Image (cartoon, grey):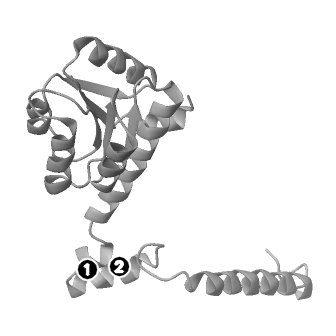
Amino acid sequence: MNDCLVNFLSDIRVLVVDDDPGMLNSLSRLISSFELNVRTFSKGQELVSSLPDDGRCLVISDVRMFDMPGMAILRWITEHRTEIPVILVSAYADVGMAVHAMRSGAVAVLRKPYSEDELWDAIRDGIQANDAALVKRVPSREQQIDSTSDRSIMRFLGPSFRTSSPSWLPNTWRICSSTSSTSRSLAMTASPASVV
C-alpha cells in the first residue's frame, strides 16, 4: 500500500461488532491486513458506548445480533452521531433489506461471503463519507474570525483558497507577468555599468 495512503489512514479507527467470535476475529484480521486500526466488540451496546468523541471512525456491524441488531446500531448512529459511517454485513441480506439499510444511512451492505475487494471498497467509501461529514463540522475561517483585530491579521496574511474567491489568481498572474516583462525590458535597456 502507498506510504502516503497508509499515513492518512493511520488515524482511522474501524470499529467492528459481531456476536460470532470466529467471524469477528476473521474480519478483524482482514481489516488489519489493510493496515487500519481495528477495535472489536461482541455486543452492539458496547460499541455504541465506546464511539470516539472525535468521530474519526467507521463502524462495520453484523445485521443479526442478539443484544442490538445492526439496523438498531445504524438507527442510533444516524440519530446521534451522523458523522460516523456504518457498513452492514449479513449472510441473510436481501434486496429489500439492503435498500432499507441504504435509505436509513448505511454506506454499504455486504452479503457474506464477500471478497476483500468488496470490503475494501466499502471501507474506502466509508472513509470518504466520514471525511466529508467531519469537514462540515469544522467552522470556516470567517466564522472563527469575528473581531476587527482578527480581520486585520487576516488581511495581513493575505488571501487563501478558503477565505477568498479565486478571482485574485488572475491578478496575481498579471502582476507576475508584468513584473517579469518589466524586468526583462529593464535588463535590456540598462547599461552594463548600471547593473550591479
Residue identified by numbered label 1? 150
Q: Secondary structure at mark 1?
A: helix
The image shows residue 100 at horizontal and vertical percentages of 30, 51
The N terminus appears in which quarter of the rendering? top right
Whether 145 is drawn above or below 105: the answer is below
For residue 47, which quarter of the picture? top left
Give neighbour class at mark 2: few <14, some 14-19, many 20+ (Cα, 10 Å).
some
Q: Is residue 142 in view?
A: yes
Rendered residue at 20%/53% (across/down): 78
Q: Are marks 1 and 2 in contact (CB under 8 Å)?
A: yes
For residue 174, which quarter of the picture? bottom right
Point out which mark residue 154 bears. Answer: 2
Give neighbour class at mark 1: few <14, some 14-19, many 20+ (Cα, 10 Å).
few
Q: Nearer the viewer, residue 185 or 6?
A: 6
Rendered residue at 14%/48% (across/down): 76
Q: Is residue 52 in view?
A: no
Is 42 on the left or on the right of 169, as rendered? left
Amino acid on which disc 2 is placed: Met
